[in-house]
Image (cartoon, helix red, strand yellow):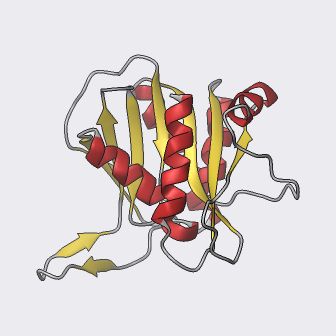
């Protein structure tokens, strides 16, 4: 059992039919870049920070001499589409931590009004592509087909989705809400804003 500490920054009323967006660090930092862009572009309001004893036992040191604690952050966006955005500088280290934190994030999202979940990430292909493709995996065939109609692809090799991007879909489905993971092609060995942009374009078509 891991301990998760919730630090409420601001109390807000639940949004109506909001979309829960997850963009934590992962392959190419695609999800995190996309989430941070949404927060900056639409003036996201930080409402909560999460701290967990399964995060790396360290702090990050900034150029100005201050520290940055390892945490996840929850932001609320009201316009143009109600969104609850999850980002941060880390994920949990252990399987137990991943499961408990993913469940907690979905529960928090639903408390703030989420009715759909989109997790964002990278799909490592080991090389740079000028025009990255976006792949989808969803909690239902109907949702997967709707997203494919907007240009996303299914992964021919199947495969898996590791971490919060996958587990948050499991807990969304268990809670009775739809969810999908949008994965942008990326080399996997560098930070990839181009892939993040393609993922964001797909999000904009679905929200």
161 relative to 196 in the view: left or right: right
Q: Which of 107 and 90 is in front in this view?
A: 90
Q: Quarter-wise, where is residue 66 in the image?
A: bottom left
Given residues 95 and 201, the one toward you in this image is 201
Q: Give the left or right position of residue 139, taking residue 189 as reference.
A: right
Left or right for 165, reference 42 = right
Q: Which quarter of the figure has residue 68?
A: bottom left
Q: Where is residue 194 in the image (x, y as percent from the top left)?
A: 50, 62
Residue at the (60%, 44%) spot, across then down: 168
Residue 95: x %, y % from top left = 64, 63
Q: Can you name the residue that lies furthest to the right here?
A: 157
**Is the residue 96 above or below the residue 139 in the image?**
below
Q: Is residue 120 above or below residue 88?
A: above
Quarter the N terminus occupies = bottom right
Residue farthest along the front direction in this orientation:
130
Write the residue at 49% across / 46% down. Answer: 200
Given residues 96 and 158, the one toward you in this image is: 158
| Above or below for 15 versus 36 | above
In the displayed orientation, state which residue is furthest to the left. Answer: 64
Residue at (29% x, 78% y) in the render: 60
* Residue 178 screen position, x and y as percent: 64, 28
* Residue 146 in sight: yes
Estimate the x, y position of residue 126 in percent, counting from the top left.
70, 77
- Is residue 7 visible in the rendered structure shown here? no
Q: Which residue is drawn at 44% across and 58% down?
A: 32
Q: Is residue 82 left or right of residue 125?
A: left
């Amino acid at each position: 059992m891991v301990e998760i500490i919730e630090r409420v920054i601001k109390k807000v009323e639940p949004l109506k039919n909001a979309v829960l967006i997850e963009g934590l660090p992962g392959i190419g930092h695609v999800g995190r870049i996309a989430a941070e862009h949404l927060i900056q572009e639409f003036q996201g309001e930080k409402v909560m920070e999460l701290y967990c004893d399964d995060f790396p036992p360290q702090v990050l040191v900034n150029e100005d001499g201050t520290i940055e604690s390892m945490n996840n952050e929850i932001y609320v966006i009201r316009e143009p589409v109600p969104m609850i955005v999850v980002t941060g500088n880390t994920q949990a280290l252990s399987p137990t931590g991943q499961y408990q934190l993913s469940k907690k994030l979905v529960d928090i999202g639903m408390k703030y009004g989420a009715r759909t979940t989109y997790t964002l990430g990278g799909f490592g292909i080991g090389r740079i592509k000028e025009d990255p493709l976006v792949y989808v995996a969803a909690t239902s065939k109907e949702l997967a087909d709707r997203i494919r109609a907007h240009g996303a692809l299914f992964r021919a090799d199947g495969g898996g989705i590791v971490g919060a991007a996958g587990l948050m879909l499991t807990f969304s489905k268990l809670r009775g809400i739809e969810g999908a993971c949008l994965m942008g092609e990326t080399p996997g060995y560098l930070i990839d804003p181009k892939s993040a942009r393609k993922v964001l374009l797909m999000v904009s078509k679905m929200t």
